[in-house]
Image (spheres, rainbow, N blue to C red):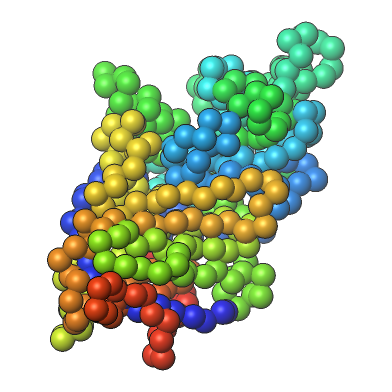
């Protein structure tokens, strides 16, 4: 683990409560469940590796539009006709064609025991495989439609569907739906939804239907065994982006190798150094949606720049690292611009691995400079998210 650190003086924080996906204890149960699958899962594009993940889960700048949005799955790069594989055992739930995801195969999978999420009991979760290729010619033995032809869809058969095994060929890669077209390479958009197929968007747009009260999407990287701390290939860093001066934003950059885009959570604390008490705090959590307003779809896909927010950096199939910027706005920092306070920022991946840094600002005659000094501390440890 590379060690470095920064010290900074000044901050302000106002916590915003957002609707959570699941509680922290429920998330711990989901973590444990997915960890138990690691010996039997596989990447959903035949022949591809983690290096081919070109768009991560969470806040991003969409390559085809250059717009900010909250990406609810992962994109894996490839070419038209690449075999799409079931990530884990399940049953065929539905083959759907719709404007966003294009040709989509949906599988249903069982939890090993009933999960309680937001007060409701669930036995299943679902994987989605989107933007698939179909030649629109039935019965010629090619394309996704022919692969699933004859399969029994559990959605239309009382929950009973054709059994699917991990690694089974379930579709062909394409660019159907709103995949970005010619400006965006053929890719698979894969999602996992816990408990229900009803997305947050559907629930908000259809208030008279079954409401679950949470956004069911979770990071699909939970399926795959991660690198761990101590492995030289997994070496995340958390550093300030250049100098910090008074009346300016503080930008902190999280960076890790491009094969492990697992970032899930930022915690920010303002510490009174006279007694080490936390005087202000803020949390952004991708899977729990903390710090993101999930009461309306358009708000989840916009940045609350009055509070700490994510300013995504470019990430694609040619990237050599995965990075994300956490911006602490000047107005959020205002009010703690004197000696006696420090800021602690921690970043966590989906498994709770923590990378943290301490910041303090030392006043100078006209400005405040971000110092890299003796006693600076960067630490990493394993902790539950």
x, y (%) of residue 269? 26, 69
Percent across and percent down for residue 377 are 41, 83
Where does the N terminus fall, quadrant-wise? bottom right
Name the outermost residue toward the right: 140
Q: Residue at x 26, y 66 (%)?
A: 246
Would you say 287 lies left or right of 140 here?
left
Question: Relative to the observer, which residue lies in front, 328 or 178?
Answer: 328
Give the camera-side residue of 242 and 348. 242
- Examine the rendering and report whether any part of residue 104 can be seen: no
- Judge whether 269 appears above or below 221 on screen: below
In depth, the one of 10 and 261 nearer the eye is: 10
Q: Is residue 315 left or right of residue 214?
A: right
Residue 54 coordinates in the image, percent (x, y): 64, 45
In this view, which residue lies farthest toward the front? Answer: 366
State whether residue 167 appears in this view.
yes
The relative height of residue 144 versus residue 190 in the rendered view (above or below) is above
Side (left or right) of 321 relative to 273? right
Q: Quadrant of the C terminus?
A: bottom left
**Vertical placement of residue 24 versus 169, above or below:** below
Q: Residue at x 15, y 66 (%)?
A: 335
Q: Position of residue 221 (x, y in %)?
A: 57, 51
- Picture quadrant of residue 344: bottom left
Residue situated in front as seen by the camera: 186 or 23: 186
Q: How many marks are shown on the rendered structure?
A: 0
At horizontal 41% and vertical 63% (from top left) the residue drawn is 252
Residue name at image x 36 percent, y 75 percent: 370
- Residue occupying the far bottom of the picture: 374
């Amino acid at each position: 683990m590379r060690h470095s650190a920064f010290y900074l003086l000044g901050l302000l924080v106002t916590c915003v409560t957002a609707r959570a996906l699941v509680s922290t204890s429920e998330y711990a149960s989901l973590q444990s469940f997915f960890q138990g699958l690691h010996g039997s899962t596989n990447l959903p594009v035949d022949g591809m590796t983690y290096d081919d993940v070109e768009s991560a889960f969470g806040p991003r700048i969409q390559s085809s539009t250059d717009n900010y949005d909250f990406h609810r799955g992962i994109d894996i790069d490839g070419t038209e006709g690449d075999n799409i594989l079931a990530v884990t055992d399940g049953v065929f739930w539905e083959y759907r064609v719709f404007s966003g995801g294009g040709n989509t195969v949906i599988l249903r999978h069982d939890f090993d025991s009933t999960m309680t999420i937001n007060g409701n009991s669930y036995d299943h979760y679902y994987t989605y495989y989107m933007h698939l290729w179909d030649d629109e010619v039935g019965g010629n033995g090619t394309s996704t439609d022919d692969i699933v032809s004859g399969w029994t869809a559990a959605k239309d058969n009382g929950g009973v569907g054709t059994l699917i095994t991990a690694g089974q060929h379930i579709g062909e890669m394409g660019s159907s739906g709103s995949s970005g077209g010619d400006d965006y390479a053929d890719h698979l958009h894969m999602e996992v939804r816990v408990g229900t197929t009803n997305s947050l968007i559907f629930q908000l747009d259809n208030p008279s239907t079954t409401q679950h009260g949470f956004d069911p999407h979770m990071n699909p990287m939970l399926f795959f065994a991660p690198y761990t701390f101590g492995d030289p290939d997994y070496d995340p860093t958390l550093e300030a982006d250049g100098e910090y001066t008074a009346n300016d934003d503080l930008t902190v950059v999280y960076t890790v190798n491009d094969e492990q885009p697992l970032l899930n959570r930022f915690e920010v604390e303002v510490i009174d150094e006279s007694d080490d008490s936390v005087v202000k705090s803020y949390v952004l959590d991708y899977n729990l949606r903390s710090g993101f307003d999930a009461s309306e779809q358009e708000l989840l896909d916009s940045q609350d720049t009055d509070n700490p927010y994510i300013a995504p950096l470019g990430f694609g199939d040619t990237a050599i690292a995965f990075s994300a910027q956490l911006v602490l706005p000047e107005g959020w920092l205002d009010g703690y611009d004197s000696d006696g306070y420090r800021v602690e920022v921690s970043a966590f991946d989906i498994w709770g691995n923590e990378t943290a840094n301490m910041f303090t600002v030392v006043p100078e005659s006209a400005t405040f400079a971000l110092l890299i000094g003796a006693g600076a501390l960067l630490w990493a440890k394993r902790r539950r998210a």
